[in-house]
Amino acid sequence: MKINEIFYSLQGEGYWTGTPAVFIRFSGCNLNCSFCDTEHENGRQMTIDNIISEVSKYPTQHIIFTGGEPTLQLNRELIDRLHTLGKYLHMETNGSISLSDGIDKELDWITVSPKDAPVKIQRIDELKVVYHGAEQDMTRFESIPTAGPNSRYLQPCDVKTPETNERIISDAIEYIKRHPQWRLSLQTHKLLGIR
């Protein structure tokens, strides 16, 4: 597998904010979003044994597969081996690729952050929409089914301009107040200056 990086930090977004986790960032993505804030293209080839050895250095049971787009490489063998070690397996995906080999049933948590492509993944435990402001059409996201209540998060897009970021956050707050099925997700890792 081509892995961009493996690191230990706190989850900064959504339902699991503040949870210690090992992040396994896969290289590559099937989409090319202009607002992507992750340099995921580079990486090194790692075997499953290499990945498990690296993950085992850290005390948490929570593992987050992210990217890039993890569905391009994630396989049943890695999932089964990590589950054998008692790990809680969480995947962050754009949701545009359906999972094969029953992987959707084996993962403990699936966070979907849909972009412009249609959502094809079989299960969504948490929907996290990157919000660009009041001009964004939310119609498509409102109709995406999720696993249950309190599972929809609106995350203001960080455009690196303080004035624009303030407007986007304000728009997100107003949208959530009008649509209370949504919750606010801030990128707390950026606010705290951690990875």
Image (cartoon, rainbow, N blue to C red):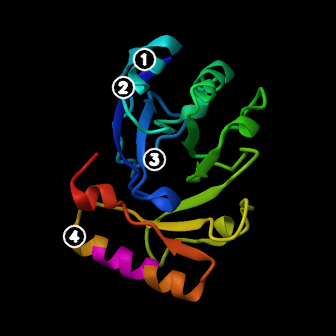
Residue 47 is at least partly visible in this image: no
**Counting residues from the N terminus, which is met first, the one under dot 4 or under dot 1?**
1
- Which residue is painted at 42% across and 42% down in the image? 21
Hey, what amino acid is under mark 2? Answer: Lys
Looking at the magenta stretch, what is its main secondary structure? helix
**Counting residues from the N terminus, which is met first, the one under dot 4 or under dot 2?**
2
Left or right, 124 with respect to 23, comes to right
Marks 3/1: CA distance? 32 Å
- Which residue is painted at 56% across and 34% down in the image? 87
Q: Is residue 89 above or below residue 159?
A: above
Local packing at callout 2 (Cα closer than 10 Å; few below 14, some 14-19, many 20+) is few
Q: Are marks 1 and 2 in contact (CB under 8 Å)?
A: yes
Marks 4/1: CA distance? 41 Å
Mark seen at residue 53: 1
- In the rendered structure, which segment of residues is drawn in magenta? 166-172
Residue 129: image location, x then y, percent: 53, 62
SS category of the residue bearing label 3: loop
- Eye-nearest disc, 4 or 3: 4
Hey, what amino acid is under mark 3? Answer: Cys
Hey, what amino acid is under mark 4? Answer: Pro
Mark seen at residue 162: 4
Total label count?
4
Residue highlighted by disc 2: 57
SS category of the residue bearing label 2: loop
SS category of the residue bearing label 4: helix
Hey, what amino acid is under mark 1? Answer: Ser
- Eye-nearest disc, 4 or 1: 1
Residue highlighted by disc 3: 33
Residue 76 is at least partly visible in this image: yes
